[in-house]
Image (cartoon, coloured by chain):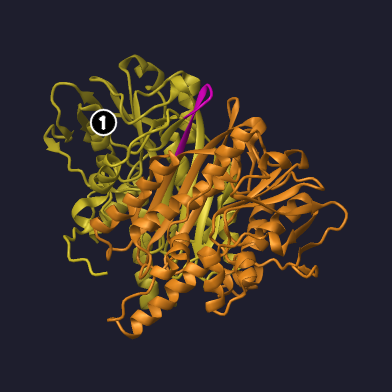
Chain colours: A orange, B yellow
Amino acid sequence: MKNTEKRTELGELGEFGLIDRIKKRTRQQNKSSVLGIGDDAAIIEAGDEYKVVSSDLLAEGIHFDLSYFPLKHLGYKSVSVNVSDIAAMNAKPEQILVNLAVSNRFSVEAIDEFYEGVNMACEDYKVDLVGGDTSSSSAGLFISVTAIGSVAIDKVVKRRGAAGGDIICATGDLGGAYIGLQVLAREKQVYMADPNMQPQLEKYKYMVGRQLKPVARMDIIHELDELGVVPTSMIDISDGLASELFHLHKHSGLGVKIFEDKLPIDNQTYEAAVEFNLDPITCVLNGGEDYELLFTISQDDHDKLEKHPDIHFIGFMDAKDKDVGLVTKNENWVPLKAQGWQHFES
Amino acid sequence: MKNTEKRTELGELGEFGLIDRIKKRTRQQNKSSVLGIGDDAAIIEAGDEYKVVSSDLLAEGIHFDLSYFPLKHLGYKSVSVNVSDIAAMNAKPEQILVNLAVSNRFSVEAIDEFYEGVNMACEDYKVDLVGGDTSSSSAGLFISVTAIGSVAIDKVVKRRGAAGGDIICATGDLGGAYIGLQVLAREKQVYMADPNMQPQLEKYKYMVGRQLKPVARMDIIHELDELGVVPTSMIDISDGLASELFHLHKHSGLGVKIFEDKLPIDNQTYEAAVEFNLDPITCVLNGGEDYELLFTISQDDHDKLEKHPDIHFIGFMDAKDKDVGLVTKNENWVPLKAQGWQHFES
């Protein structure tokens, strides 16, 4: 049973390295498999439209800490995370399946609370909970959600597709969910040191809400549809803006230029970042879990979105210079670094 | 944060009780959701055919013990379990998504081995691995697989649909996977008591194979199609024959009569059961994980399947007497008990 062969640690490869490795060894046999591993969702042929399918896993102690994450919010967030992937394909979510592994420290009432959050999200996103599996776990809570959406064949948007000169757009504001996590972690420490201390969350309500109850931007998808705009490429911002920009870079083969003064950050997020001795721009670039959308549009669509209050033009795709970087307020050029998801290294 | 409200243990409710509870609180909003929670897979409208979707979770220490479960087999089995659910809808699997949470005790090479099994199963079942998620886990290995298949609208088969007089059919042989698990558990004890002892598996190869590398019966689905037989209801045998018969009973509202002398059991399984002081018929009725198919056919289809070497007529659906039971070789009547999946109670 002993294995004396080479051992490579998962941290050496990282998440994206592991995905590439898995992808390389698969081969597609069915013509209904239109797009496989490597985008926000897979694309499957379904009559005269496409189905898009995404599946994500949330593990206790890695993705959430139950000491400050209410189960109802966790249920809601588990759905949001997957709906966000469906949105990133410009599709509309219709069904979800929820798999749950729970240890026996959870009661039926606790599971009820979790599903209350799931059902609230189902109402909000107009999706149906159609299946899944419930099992016990020897340790911890594991949640795996699969979301299925549909989209007209000529409307599907992938990570690939941007052209030189396309405008890079980001929705909402960024960095808030990351600051919310810092606040929750700090209050947990305070509470553990003195359980009589009440958590001071009021001041940070917005950021804590961004962390605990993220909302997938289906509103933007519906508005783009109404405005007649089909993005040339799209991805959701789950791992942080910089990481997602690198995906667009990789899939388009183009340079990516963004401007510091165009980056969307909420005032409260900015102030809290300063209070936490964090650089607000770093929070915007590398803080994850905002579940906003990052997409590119043709310059022809500029006027249709210019006045949209929640869509920000943050930069452009560059066919000449293939670098990925940020132009600062002082007009300095700062190359961005791919950060991404590094759970395996911790 | 303290919860002084009522606490109901998950074991009090059981898996099926929990599923019913979850189902009751969901409501379907999309017309594309044809069938939701409560069958082997959900049914989704997709142009002029149906897509069927199933998702299952396997947790270390609950569903498998890595001290005797090779990762390659585990990868294969994770796919089989889900393909079996697709088969039970009379559909053909086309895509799978695999979510994995792994602790850092796993190396890249270990993950490779797991996916080698996944890819072997993809070859065998002609399905494409199109997505999923890889994450770290604070403890243990968790696998969640989603399978998607397609079926003509007039060929989909549900748990509901059997009529009085329909013949109950079971494929293959039953109880083997359960005996295989007993063998593996015994050899583990022997090995732990004395690591110099080599496991004695040769004699039990068939049953151990049934446990470690179950094969979903897609061959039967293709054959039924060729023979022009559409079952009136179907379910896969994952929790044990008795449990599945109760599902058919519940969904049809009919009685279920099976005959002891018609139950399919392999000779080696029979002999090993006796050796382990287990009643072979109890193993057939309540041993799970064989991943065979249980279905009902109209009497009109009797002749088409009568000579099939791997389809066994084990009983009939009874419109008059609504009991679920077994007629013994001595013509005694033994009511069956719903056993099912009881992880929460252990």
Q: Main secondary structure of the magenta part?
A: strand
Residue A108 appears at what percent x and percent y? 24, 56
Q: Is residue A242 covered in magenta?
A: no
Q: Residue furthest right?
A: A320
Q: Is residue B199 at all visible to an observer of this figure?
A: no
The single residue placed furthest to the left in the displayed view is B332
Q: Is residue A294 above or below residue B142?
A: above
What residue does disc 1 label?
B251
Query: Would residue A164 be found to the left or right of residue B81 on screen?
Result: right
In the image, what residue occupies the spot 42% across and 28% down? Answer: B31
Residue kind at label 1, given as amino acid type:
His
Give yes or no for residue B50 being in the magenta stretch: yes
Residue B71 percent coordinates (x, y): 52, 60
Quarter of the image holding residue B332?
top left
Going by the image, does A316 lie left or right of B340?
A: right
Quadrant for the C terminus of chain A, please: bottom right
In which chain is the residue bearing label 1?
A: B
Q: In the rendering, at what x and y percent does residue B142 appear? A: 45, 60
Front in this rendered view, residue A42 or B302: A42
Classify B44 as above or below A324.
above
Magenta range is B45-53
